[in-house]
Amino acid sequence: MTARHLPPPSPTCRGAAPPLLITVTDVPGAARVLRLDGEIDQDRRAALEDALAAAVEARPPRLVVDLSGLAFCDSTGLNALLKTRLAAQAADVELVIAAPPAHVERLLKITGTDHLFATCDSIRTAVYGPLTGLPLAQEGAPPCRAS
């Protein structure tokens, strides 16, 4: 398993919100995991979209977007995920959202997009669940929900 950090954008002024840290981890034969830590907003859109596009272009069997470290996400993040969903479908890459915090689950629900994503409460299940379109819970792991 290899991991690397993509550099965060530099803040434009003092007191700016914490940067978005994107960590990319490859799990050979299973998945590419993008862990997002910090905040997603308009200022961080380009870095996020570039990282998601590069992940899809690598054509892993499964692309897991780990949101467990996300402190804030507005419509910018939702649009990036929706765009990535379409690109992943076109590239035959299974997209799974892992460990979305309550504020992201609420965003998906109030926008009516929650049914578009396979989501897992566990990173382990998101990475190692069967490649069937619906990642199934492994023993001791929380279940996933299909798109």
Image (cartoon, helix red, strand yellow):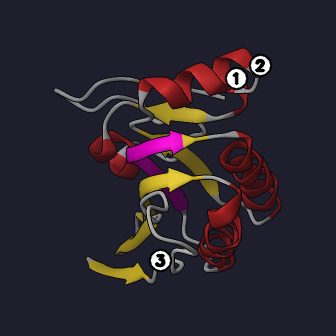
Q: Kindly check if marks 2 and 1 are in contact, taking CB atoms under 8 A apart as contact.
A: yes
Q: Quadrant of the C terminus?
A: top right
The image quadrant that residue 55 belongs to is: bottom right
Q: Quadrant of residue 28?
A: bottom left
Residue type for callout 1: His
Eye-nearest disc, 3 or 1? 3
User: Which residue occupies 50% across, 26% down?
Assistant: 103
Closest to the observer, 147 or 68: 68
Res 8 label? 3
**Crowding at mark 1 (Cα within 10 Å: few <14, some 14-19, many 20+):** few
Residue at 79%, 61% (x, y): give it: 87
Which disc is residue 115 wearing? 1
Task: From this view, report whether residue 42 is shown above or below residue 136.
Answer: below
Look at the image and tell me whether residue 143 can be seen.
yes
The residues bearing labels 2 and 3 have C-alpha atoms spaced at a distance of: 30 Å
Q: Is residue 117 above or below residue 111?
A: below
The span picked out in magenta is: 62-72
Q: Secondary structure at mark 3?
A: loop
Q: Amino acid at mark 3?
A: Pro
Q: Which mark is residue 112?
A: 2
Residues under numbered marks 3 and 1 in contact, where contact means CB atoms less than 8 Å apart: no
Residue 74: % across, % down? 65, 40
Q: Which x, y percent locates residue 81?
A: 69, 49
